[in-house]
Image (spheres, grey):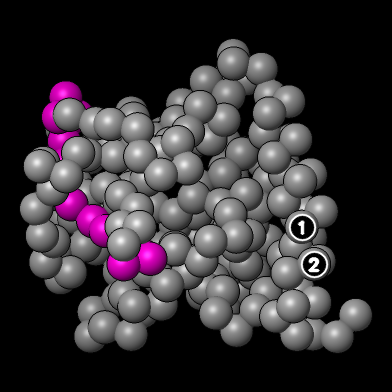
Amino acid sequence: MANTPEALSVEKAPLRKAMRKARAGMSVDARTAASAAIRERLTALPVFQRAGGVHCFLSLPEEVDTAPIIAASAEAGKRTFVPYVDSAAGRLGHTPWCPGQPLETGAFGLQEPPPGARTPVAWQWIELVLVPGLAFDRDGGRLGFGKGYYDAFLAMLAAGPRPPATVGLAFSQQIVPAVPMTARDVRVQLIVTERETIVPAPAR
């Protein structure tokens, strides 16, 4: 198959379907235990400990549970930020947020702060971005959800003067031999699963 965006999009479709099925097949207990192990592994990393500002997605039920990670970040005195979907602009928006502050269900069923609770973010405050994904490979390749929101966000940060560290959070079954990549897809610098911390080759 030709290595074009259209061909890669077709190639990604069955992988997305397989990864959604794999995540959905995890029991609640298995997901809870794996999420706890991921939190412990992540928060022990120097990249997390030295970050003054942490950007983290608000997880869906089948994803790595990020609520304890956000709580650990806030308890450590870090600035914490979460995304929301800015449908009018066709991009992610971002706002400071702490546990206990209001949330509502937004686009794609995601939890996000309501419009009245959003405030601007100074990009230099973000020193670590915790990235969701359906699958990752050991070169830092990431399979997103097909909308391109995170790739655009990560590309924007990478083009800035002080790009933050990027860490993918995933269950071990979400690590695949290779993720089909297009020119706009952005690789992450680390991947944390319940079993290991993966350092992609380019970052070694």
Q: Name the residue rendered at 74%, 78% in the picture.
A: 6
Question: Which residue is drawn at the image coordinates 28% and 31% (left, top)?
Answer: 104
Q: Indicate whether residue 96 is drawn in magenta.
A: yes
Query: Which residues are the magenta region?
Result: 89-101
Residue plotted at (31% across, 67% down): 89
**For numbered disc 2, what is the local secondary structure?**
helix
Numbered mark located on residue 10 in the image: 2
Residue shown at 75% from the left, 62% from the top:
12
Amino acid type of the residue tagged 1 in the rendering = Ala
Is 53 in the magenta? no
Q: Residue 9: horizontal and vertical position, in percent?
A: 73, 69
Q: Quadrant of residue 15?
A: bottom right
Left or right of residue 196, residue 92 in this image: left
- In the rendered view, does 134 fall on the left or right side of 155? right
- Is 66 drawn above or below residue 181 in the view shown? above
**Amino acid type of the residue tagged 2 in the rendering:** Val
Q: Position of residue 173 (x, y in %)?
A: 72, 40
User: Which residue is farthest right?
Assistant: 1
Residue indicated by mark 1? 13
Q: Which mark is residue 169?
A: none
Work out whether residue 14 or residue 79 is closer to the camera in this orientation and state it.
14
Query: Badges 2 and 1: C-beta atoms under 8 Å apart?
Result: yes
Q: Residues within 10 Å of mark 2 (few under 14, many from 20)?
A: few
